[in-house]
Structures are given as C-alpha cells and as structure tokens.
Amino acid sequence: MRAYSCDLRERVLADFDGGLGNEAVARKYRVSSRWVFKLRRQREQTGLIAPRRGRTGPPRMLAGQEERLAELVRRRPDATLRELRDELGLPMSLVTVWRALKRLGLTLKKSPARR
C-alpha cells in the first residue's frame, strides 16, 4: 500500500486546524480517524508531515557472521544445518542458518539421518 500524498496530508491538517474534528475530517477525505490522529501526533512530535520510511524489522542474527559461515561450509561441506549452528554458537533457528546460506549462494547436500 502506498503512503498518502503530502498534498492530502496538508489538506487534512488544514481542515483540522480550521475547526473540524478527527471524525469529520476522516469522513471528508475518506481516511480513517486513527490515521488523522497519527498524522497530528507526528506533526506535534517531529514537525514533519511527510510519510515516514517503512520499518525494517529486527537486525539479522548473522549480521557480520556471513564470512565465518561461508568458511565453515568450505571447511566442512558435509555439515548439517544443526552442526553449522552449533559451531557458530549463536542462539538461532535452523531456518535462520538456511536463509543465510541461501543469501550467500551456498548449498548443503547433507540431511540429518532419518529413522
């Protein structure tokens, strides 16, 4: 979903400053009253009304460890994901290790033994 334009933001705030309430402004411009409230709060706190950048989420668990992981795979190409995780010594899921390998373009052929 795209952010609302600065032009719309200016008109919404102008109408609010002109005396219309949150609900009336929201109905007039077909936006949610919660968005109007958040826009007002953003202006009060930062002085800006432009859309904020999207949030990116938590940092990667293996940030800065990619070269170390690649070296482990070069040394032990037959290691399982669990063995690689244990060698790294970081608390993470096996999927995190797999995704890091995928980003690095590395593959593992070995699977853990099955019953």
Image: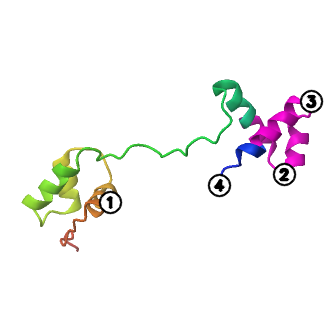
Q: Pointer 2 and pointer 4: residues touching (CB < 8 Å)? A: no
- The quarter of the image holding the C terminus is bottom left
Residue tagged 4: 2
Instruction: Describe the element under mark 2 as helix, strand or loop.
Output: loop
Q: Pointer 2 and pointer 1: residues touching (CB < 8 Å)? A: no
Residue tagged 2: 30
Residue 17 covered by magenta stretch: yes
Q: What's the CA distance linking mark 3 and mark 4?
A: 28 Å
First in sequence: mark 1 vs mark 3: 3
Residue tagged 1: 99
First in sequence: mark 2 vs mark 1: 2
Range of residues picked out in magenta? 9-38
First in sequence: mark 4 vs mark 1: 4
Under mark 2, the amino acid is Arg
Q: Nearer the viewer, mark 4 or mark 1?
A: 4
Q: Hey, which quadrant is residue 106 in on the image? A: bottom left
